[in-house]
Image (cartoon, rainbow, N blue to C red):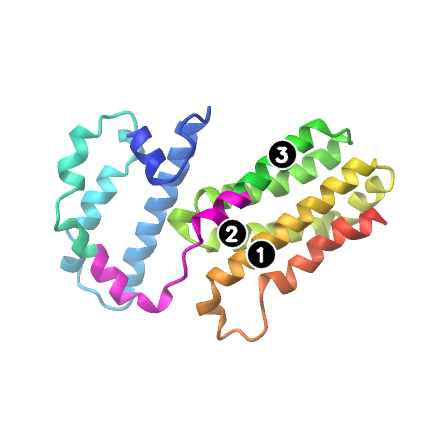
């Protein structure tokens, strides 16, 4: 089942952390299923419309089964009637729909994170600056990992976390950056650019909900702040 879920969640099959990543995605998915159930109950959906699909899928998605064989769970997971519960839920909550991130955009963001993390290891800098950048990249990577399960919300939360970290630590970041090498400053600029790109992608995915929120966008509010720490620190 680890291999099956890795394919479902689009996780690299040769990752040394594959089992941990699968468990993370399974936990996120089960959390989404509980949220789905709560939303359906809130609009008065009867319990019988949620069965048997949701109960069966919750059982199959238990982390207790990750080392089990797919053949032992195939029958329970693939019964045609299982889809009815989710088809009904999709219709009932259609107003909460969001666009899907194109596969090439998701792959490009992941590739840029890989490149940044590789550069981070090869660039001389203080332990503090290295840790600061790593935390921001890690927050975005973790959000992208569960994107196929939880949608754009974790990405938005990660971007707010990144912006908040810079706001709180701005004085020390700028002080240490003043003594940093040019490669380090270039790395910060690249990080700011990928964070802004992630914010733009998130805005595009969530444009339906944000249509009623005036001019607010992540790219407008978070992006410039993060670009500032790349651009100003290069001065």
| For residue 199, above or below residue 76 | below
* 106 in magenta: yes
* Mark 2: secondary structure: helix
Q: Quadrant of residue 223?
A: bottom right
Residue at x-position 38% and y-position 47%:
149
Q: Is residue 125 magenta?
A: no
Residue 77 is left or right of residue 225, and the answer is: left
Give the residue at mark 1. Answer: 199
Q: What kind of element bears circle 1?
A: helix
Q: Is residue 166 left or right of residue 70?
A: right
Residue for point 18% across, 49% down: 53
Q: CA distance from mark 3 to mark 2?
A: 18 Å
Between discs 1 and 2, the one toward the N terminus: 2
> Would you name the residue on which mark 3 appears?
117
Principal SS element in the magenta part? helix
The answer to whether 203 appears left or right of 116 in the picture is left
Residue topped by disc 2: 155
Q: Residues within 10 Å of mark 1 (few under 14, many from 20)?
A: many
Q: Mark 3 falls on what kind of element?
A: helix
Q: Position of residue 104 (x, y in %)?
A: 47, 47
Nearer the observer, 175 or 233: 233
């Amino acid at each position: 089942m680890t291999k099956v879920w890795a394919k479902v969640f689009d996780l690299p099959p040769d990752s040394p952390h594959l089992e941990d990543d699968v468990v993370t995605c399974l936990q996120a998915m089960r959390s989404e299923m509980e949220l789905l159930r709560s939303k359906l109950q809130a609009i008065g959906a009867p319990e019988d419309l949620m069965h048997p699909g949701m109960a069966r899928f919750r059982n199959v998605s238990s982390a207790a089964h990750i080392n089990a064989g797919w053949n032992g769970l195939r029958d329970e997971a693939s019964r045609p009637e299982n889809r009815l519960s989710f088809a009904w839920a999709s219709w009932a909550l259609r107003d909460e729909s969001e666009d899907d991130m194109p596969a090439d955009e998701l792959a490009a963001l992941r590739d840029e994170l890989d490149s940044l993390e590789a550069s981070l290891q090869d660039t001389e800098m203080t332990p503090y600056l290295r840790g600061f950048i790593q935390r921001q990249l890690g927050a975005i990577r973790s959000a992208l990992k569960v994107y196929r399960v939880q949608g754009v919300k974790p990405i938005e939360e990660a971007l707010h976390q990144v912006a908040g970290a810079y706001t709180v630590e701005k004085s020390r970041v700028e002080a240490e950056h003043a003594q940093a090498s040019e490669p380090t400053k270039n790395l910060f600029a690249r990080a700011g650019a990928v964070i802004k790109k992630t914010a733009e992608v998130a805005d595009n995915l969530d444009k339906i909900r944000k249509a009623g929120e005036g001019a607010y966008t992540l790219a407008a509010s978070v992006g410039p702040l993060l670009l500032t720490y790349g651009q100003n620190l290069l001065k």
